[in-house]
Image: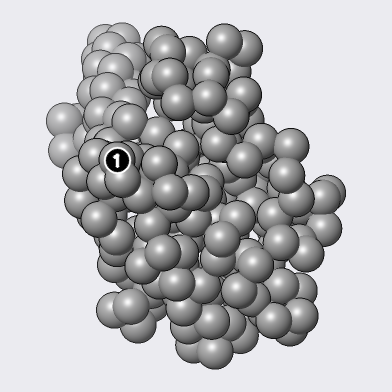
């Protein structure tokens, strides 16, 4: 009888803990909002992403492209390995029409310099969407040779300067994601539906950054082992309390 009771409790405990684990992972994927200032607040980590949002997007990160990308990267490298910094700039239509906000372009270059000086061992990632892509190109042109070498990877979604080099950053460090039918990527001003759904490329971008930073799966494996250890500990606690 005790054996049957133990097995029933074991099954119940597995269901409870599995549901709790699923809820925890779902919450972790929603952790990034439209504003992050981790770098300017003094944080350092293995990877620092300096991200420029698109035109009219809220906060300093936007909502449709940046946060899903960061959440996907957290799933690979772990939150402790990631610092996110949005680029402050007006993100108005006039900026896009004139090749990208000059203020935003300078701010992005300054943030790269800050990351390099404040966190000398971090892997710096420049990323952005739409007008944010213009800022990346403009900022890269402002970097000296040393700072250019510090760039570990570049990811641009819906790049208005598609096909143009990113300053002197090596081409193998650059991932440009442009959808078929996206007129912005064809150097035209029309905003088509193809320009508005880059959240679907979050995993592709995250895998590229993790691979360039040589962190692809490492921290994720460590977190999985820790999760299993905690899972087993909780399981035995539930059974012990019910017997």
Q: Secondary structure at mark 1?
A: helix
Label 1: which residue? 93
In which quarter of the view is residue 65 placed? top left
x%, y% of residue 31?
27, 44
* Residue drawn where x is 28% and y is 12% of the image: 8
Q: Nearer the viewer, residue 19 or 156?
A: 156
At a point 40% along the width and 19% down the height, the residue shown is 191
- Where residue 69 sits: x, y (%)? 46, 38
Q: What residue is at 70 percent from the left and 54 percent from the top?
A: 166
- Give neighbour class at mark 1: few <14, some 14-19, many 20+ (Cα, 10 Å): some
| Depth order, front residue of 187/124 | 187
User: Vertical placement of 110 versus 200: above or below?
Assistant: below
Residue 68: name its quadrant.
top left
Seen from the viewer's position, the closer of residues 242 and 1 is 242
Q: Quadrant of residue 189?
A: top left
The structure residue drawn at horizontal position 40% and vertical position 43%, both measured from the top left corner, is 96
Q: Position of residue 226 (x, y in %)?
A: 48, 50
Residue at the extreme bottom: 117
Q: Is residue 10 visible?
A: no
Left or right for 197, reference 239: right
Give the percent coordinates (x, y) of residue 210. Answer: 65, 49
Please say whether residue 56 is visible from this viewpoint: yes
**Position of 208 relative to 11 (above/below):** below
Q: From the image, which quarter does the C terminus lie in?
A: top left
The quarter in which the N terminus is drawn is top left
Count all numbered tags in the image, as a single digit.
1
Q: Is residue 31 left or right of residue 190?
A: left
| Residue 157 relative to residue 12: left or right | right
User: What colour scheme governs how the chains and residues are painted in the rendered image of this protein?
Assistant: one colour
Q: Is residue 10 above or below residue 50?
A: above
């Amino acid at each position: 009888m005790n054996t049957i009771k133990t097995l029933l409790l074991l099954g119940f405990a597995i269901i409870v803990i599995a549901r709790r684990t699923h809820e925890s992972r779902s919450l972790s994927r929603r952790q990034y909002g439209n504003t992050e200032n981790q770098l300017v607040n003094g944080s350092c980590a293995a990877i620092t992403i300096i991200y420029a949002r698109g035109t009219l997007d809220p906060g300093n990160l936007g909502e449709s492209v940046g946060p899903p990308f960061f959440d996907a990267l957290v799933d690979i490298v772990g939150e402790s390995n990631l610092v996110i910094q949005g680029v402050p700039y007006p993100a108005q239509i006039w900026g896009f029409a004139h090749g990208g906000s000059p203020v935003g372009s300078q701010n992005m270059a300054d943030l790269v310099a800050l990351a390099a000086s404040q966190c000398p061992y971090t892997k710096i990632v420049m990323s952005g969407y739409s007008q944010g892509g213009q800022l990346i190109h403009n900022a890269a042109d402002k970097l000296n040779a040393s700072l250019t070498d510090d760039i570990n990877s570049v990811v641009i979604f819906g790049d208005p300067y598609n096909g143009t080099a990113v300053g002197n950053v090596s081409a193998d460090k650059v991932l440009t994601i442009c959808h078929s039918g996206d007129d912005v990527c064809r150097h035209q001003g029309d905003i088509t539906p193809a320009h508005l759904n880059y959240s679907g490329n979050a995993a592709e971008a995250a895998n590229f950054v993790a691979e360039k930073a040589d962190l692809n799966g490492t921290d994720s494996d460590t977190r999985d082992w820790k999760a299993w250890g905690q899972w087993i500990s909780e399981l035995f606690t539930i059974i012990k309390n019910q017997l």
